[in-house]
Image (tube, grey):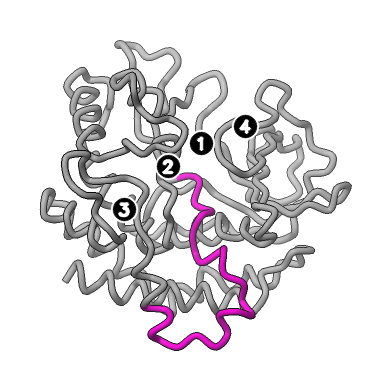
């Protein structure tokens, strides 16, 4: 099940790379993202020549936030999930560090469409700005219609959503809104529109990024437990009932509704151990980025992942 992550051998400098003239600045999201193309001869074998990547920066208040994208990619690989490869990079001209994230559709053959486009079309009063109406009942109706219309080429969307909610609960992601998931369409399908669900992208609002390491250095087990239980999914179960509080609680509700997804989710989480986390993450601390993954930050992330793994295994047992 595990996917071996792509491991870079050097700090990647994008200073001389071509910027995408058409999609240079992505409008979605709170953090600036430049679109750049890998040169014909990449500086590292993990990169695809001439392919588009996002150079995704941190929120100014949290300079090392971008590390979350790289760590989340590695954790996703450990769970056998499709997460866009993310690497440590910087621009040596500006001095800015960022996650370099591989674009997940193929230029000229595929086009990406955000779920928010569909939800807004089906529900004209949909709150696109904050996604306050983003809920699984609307999502279920949308996905069923796409499967019935033979647009969505796989009907395993129940498992996709269980896995997504499990992944977000594990990394503490609170931002899986309507524009942080979607579909990839073939531009020239042989028989009508054909789409698949996107990889799990935009994972940086997670892993305790908003907590400064020096302020959590004295945290006890109770502090970690309290912090973890405050985390919740962006998406609601339904608009017809009070919002379910907590990552764990919504996952429980989904597993009750789709019990056939439990065994796969259980297997994915079983792959996450202290040993396997160290195996996929330890090399990151040695990449010489100007904004480095400090030991205190690494320790805090590892502690959060271990604690969340423990309480999520109770849910899946």
**In the image as oriented, which residue stretches furthest toward the right?**
93
Q: Quick check: 147 left or right of 125?
A: left
Quick one: label 3 or label 1, which is nearer the N terminus? 1
Considering the numbered disc 2 on the image, is that residue within a helix, a strand or a loop?
loop
Image quadrant assignment for residue 80: bottom left
Residue 119, x across and y down, in percent? 33, 26
Q: Earlier in the sequence, mark 3 or mark 2?
A: 3
Q: CA distance from mark 4 to mark 3?
A: 25 Å
Among the two numbered marks 1 and 4 on one chain, the one whose residue lies closer to the N terminus: 4
Q: Is disc 4 in contact with disc 2, using a CB cutoff of under 8 Å?
A: no
The front one of 116 and 100 is 116
Helix or strand or loop: what does disc 4 sit on? loop
- Inter-mark Cα distance, 3 to 2: 13 Å
Determine whether, in the image, residue 39 is placed left or right of residue 87.
right
- Distance, label 3 to label 1, CA atoms, is 20 Å
Q: Is residue 238 placed above or below 214 in the rendered structure?
A: above
Q: Nearer the viewer, residue 46 or 200?
A: 200
Pointer 4 residue: 26
**What's drawn in magenta, residue-wise?**
201-225
User: Measured along the vertical axis of the image, is residue 286 above or below residue 17?
Assistant: below
Q: Residues within 10 Å of mark 4 (few under 14, many from 20)?
A: some
Q: Residues within 10 Å of mark 1 (few under 14, many from 20)?
A: some
For the point 65% across and 45% down, the residue is 56
On residue 104, which mark appears? Answer: 1
Counting residues from the N terminus, which is met first, the one under dot 4 or under dot 3? 4
Quarter of the image with the N terminus in it: bottom left
Mark 2 sits on what residue?
Answer: 199
SS of the residue under disc 1: loop
Circles 2 and 1: CB distance less than 8 Å?
yes
């Amino acid at each position: 099940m595990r996917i071996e992550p792509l491991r870079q051998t050097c700090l990647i400098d994008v200073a001389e790379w071509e910027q995408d003239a058409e999609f240079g600045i992505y409008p979605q999201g709170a953090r600036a993202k430049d679109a750049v193309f890998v040169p014909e001869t990449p500086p590292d074998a993990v990169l695809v020549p001439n392919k588009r990547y996002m150079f995704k920066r941190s929120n100014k208040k949290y300079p090392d936030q971008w590390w979350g994208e790289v760590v989340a990619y590695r954790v996703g690989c450990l769970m056998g999930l499709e997460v866009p490869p993310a690497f440590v990079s910087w621009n040596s001209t500006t001095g800015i560090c960022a996650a370099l994230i591989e674009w997940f559709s193929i230029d000229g053959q595929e086009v990406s469409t955000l779920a928010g486009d569909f939800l807004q079309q089906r529900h004209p009063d949909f709150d696109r700005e904050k996604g306050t109406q983003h809920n699984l009942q609307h999502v279920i109706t949308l996905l069923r219609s796409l499967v019935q219309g033979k647009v969505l080429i796989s009907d395993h969307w129940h498992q996709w959503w269980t896995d997504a909610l499990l992944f977000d609960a594990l990394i503490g992601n609170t931002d899986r809104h309507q524009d942080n998931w979607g579909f990839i369409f073939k531009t020239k399908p042989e028989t009508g529109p054909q789409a698949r669900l996107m990889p799990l992208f935009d994972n940086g609002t997670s892993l305790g990024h908003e907590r400064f390491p020096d302020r959590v250095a004295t945290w006890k087990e109770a502090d970690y437990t309290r912090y973890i239980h405050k985390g919740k999914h962006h998406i609601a179960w339904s608009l017809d009932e009070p919002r379910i509080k907590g990552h764990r609680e919504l996952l429980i509700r989904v597993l009750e509704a789709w019990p056939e997804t439990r065994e796969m989710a259980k297997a994915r989480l079983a792959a996450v151990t202290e040993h396997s986390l160290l195996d996929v993450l330890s090399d990151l601390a040695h990449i010489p980025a100007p904004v480095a993954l400090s030991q205190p930050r690494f320790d805090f992330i590892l502690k959060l992942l271990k604690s969340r793994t423990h309480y999520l295994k109770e849910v899946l047992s």
